[in-house]
Image (spheres, helix red, strand yellow):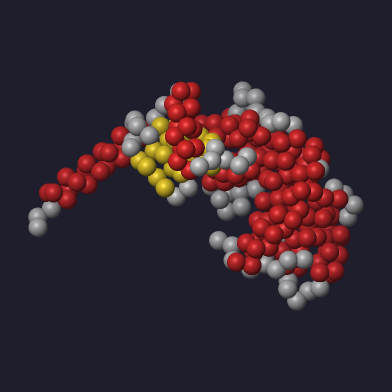
Amino acid sequence: MRGEASRIADRESRDSLAPKLRDTREDAWRIGNELFTITKVLDDSIQLERALTDPSRPVADKVAVLTELLGDNVHPMTMEIMTDLVSRHWSRARDIANAVEDFGVDAMMYYADATGATLQVSVELSELHSALLNLPVVRAKLYDYQATSEARVKLFHEVFSGKTLNKVTMRLAEHATCNLRRRRYLETIQWMINKLSRHMGESMVTVTTATPLKPEQIKRLVEVYSAKVGRQVHINSVVDPTVLGGMRIQVGDEVTDNTVVAQLQNLHRKVQTEATPA
């Protein structure tokens, strides 16, 4: 969990630079890739993270470190983002890498906007999440720390070689397994789905069912929950055969679980309680 200083630094930096990053349009693809690479470099070097976040060190010195590290090889917007980040105060050294990654995902979303693919990427990430729920062995291998990042990315390509994904979806999915960042693979994908939902000005409603939702069910859920939360919602449909039937619906921290497995668990607890002597 990030400290207060890091949360403020991340939010203020992204808010102030969002218009400029958005205006890079198709250049945002290059910027996002550069920021993902920088995230990995920072994750691999706590010494570098400390050098760029040391509050006792002049900002000019930190910028000099950046210049030595990046030179003229990155997009000017990438350098502007990094310069802004090193000028801010951080609760912990490693939090700056989190902020760089946030910017990287933002850049990919702006590229998706520029190419008219934002909704497609959101849907594809949701489908990817749902597919991997039913592939536990593959899922485990995608965040296997013992394997190389190259091997994990290769596995992802092999498993999903028959599926045509938007290049942004593919890049985000690759990043999630290439740089694990102390997270499980599906945690990262869910985080990205949530970011895309907020980016589109919607609220995410995650619906877990044993079989895929029908179009009319999705339409009805959108109507009901849009009215409930007061704004447009996006349905993240997750297929999990283990729930047996019914629906588990999550909106933020609120969970309504009407699945068969949940009802059986409740019945089991009730029977145990009634069977316990007073």
In the rendered image, the quadrant that contains the C terminus is bottom left
The residue under the point 41% across, 32% down is 209
Residue at the bottom extreme? 56
Horizontal arrangement in the rendering, residue 72 relative to residue 251 (left or right): right
Whole-percent x, y for residue 177 in the image: 62, 43
Residue 125: image quadrant is top right
Whole-percent x, y for residue 153 in the image: 65, 38
Horizontal arrangement in the rendering, residue 133 relative to residue 193 (left or right): left
Whole-percent x, y for residue 54 in the image: 73, 71
The residue under the point 66% across, 34% down is 118
Count up the numbered dots. Answer: 0
Residue at the left extreme? 277
Q: Nearer the viewer, residue 26 or 202?
A: 202
The residue under the point 13% across, 49% down is 274
Q: Nearer the viewer, residue 225 or 36?
A: 225
Q: Is residue 160 above or below residue 111?
A: above
State whether residue 5 appears in this view.
yes
Q: Is residue 14 above or below residue 148?
A: below
State whether residue 138 appears in this view.
no
Q: Is residue 241 above or below residue 33?
A: above
Residue 264: image quadrant is top left
Residue at the right extreme? 72
Q: Is residue 194 above or below residue 235?
A: below
The residue under the point 74% across, 38% down is 111
Whole-percent x, y for residue 163 in the image: 61, 25
In the rendered image, the quadrant that contains the N terminus is bottom right
